[in-house]
Amino acid sequence: MSKPQLTFWFDFGSTYSFLAAMRIEQLAKDAGVEVTWKPFLLGPVFQSQGLKDSPLNVFPVKGKALIRDAQRIAEDMGIPFKWPDKFPQSSVLAGRVALVGLKEGWGKDFGRDVFSAEYSYGRDISDQNTITEILAKHKVPVEATLTKAQSDEIKSELRDNTADAQKRGFFGAPTFTTASGELFWGNDRLEQALRWAKK
Amino acid sequence: MSKPQLTFWFDFGSTYSFLAAMRIEQLAKDAGVEVTWKPFLLGPVFQSQGLKDSPLNVFPVKGKALIRDAQRIAEDMGIPFKWPDKFPQSSVLAGRVALVGLKEGWGKDFGRDVFSAEYSYGRDISDQNTITEILAKHKVPVEATLTKAQSDEIKSELRDNTADAQKRGFFGAPTFTTASGELFWGNDRLEQALRWAKK
């Protein structure tokens, strides 16, 4: 019998996607659920709802409190947290490379390292050097992978994921969806989403 | 030795304040924490951040998903959930009456019944009849209480709570604050806030 499925939709620029990425695989394993990672772009999703920037920037009072919130949660999880100088960061390159990696079996490890570079160490993931460094660490051929990441097929896939996210009524990340189409928004709904995946 | 303290800031119009109100006392008791309830008005808080209505109305795609989210949580808690025809509802009267009740020892029971009327049964809590019915149920003298609720002292207290909320950088409800000034936003941060209250 195949395992219950949950889809983890994320944007590499999203703070709470970072927190979810760092814990989802262990929780899913404990729950007996199989997780598919799906990068998409939050920018167009926010724009279609009238937001020209991350809500953390549009509403700075809220933004300040949410940074503190994310920091407290990271501390509880025992992982370093460092707010990057640049926020939000473009996740187009990281998302495309992740799509290649998810087909080739190294996508989740790469994804965790990208999030960690950005939010545990405050680095710039829109900088190609950050990405190539992570690829090299995982012994993935850098040039060939970057070429694949810039192929029409991969570019379309990231665009399609984003269009799909909009069609499904997403408004933030992370978002989790079950096979039955139930939508859960936020790192803090991960446990609940895993329970629903098994219903 | 006095118990660790947590302040529960809420607006009777807020959906997630409802969810928090229905579970905070039991959780606080289990945690050995004493909770002070503080009604305030979200309207001016939203307005000062450029929002002219509840975020659930300003961002309807998000609003729809959050109603479903609240419903799922209420189901998990085993409490009825019915989305009111009118949203958001003015909480001025309910907030003032609650302030009287919190001084006289019946405020928390009254508060839970107001929230339950609104979100478990979809009723209009800005209608004075809803409020007087709840007062009568708790055998609180209706006329005398409404007179106190409209006194300058109580009116000022609700205004002061709201000004205090803005000064502290609130941007939604429920919000929990510890004696050390740590701020937690959202029903889903209640357990964490209780842990921090004891630090």
Image: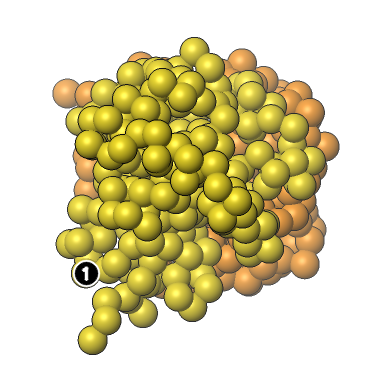
Chain colours: A yellow, B orange
Q: Secondary structure at mark 1?
A: loop
Q: Position of residue A42 (x, y in %)?
A: 61, 43
Tell which subunit mark 1 falls on: A
Quarter placement of the C terminus of chain A: bottom left
Quarter placement of the N terminus of chain A: bottom left
Question: For the point 27% across and 68% down, which residue is it?
Answer: A33
The amino acid marked with disc number 1 is Gly
Q: Quadrant of residue A150?
A: top right
Residue placed furthest toward the bottom? A1
**Does residue B72 appear anywhere in the picture?**
no
Residue placed furthest toward the top? A85
Residue placed furthest toward the right? B52
Q: How many marks?
A: 1
Q: Position of residue A197 (x, y in %)?
A: 37, 72
Q: Quadrant of residue A157?
A: bottom right
Q: Quadrant of residue A198?
A: bottom left
Question: For the point 53% across and 17% down, which residue is it?
Answer: A86
Query: Label 1: which residue?
Result: A32
- The residue lying toward the viewer, choosing from B8 and A199, is A199
Question: For the point 22% across and 48% down, which residue is it?
Answer: B30
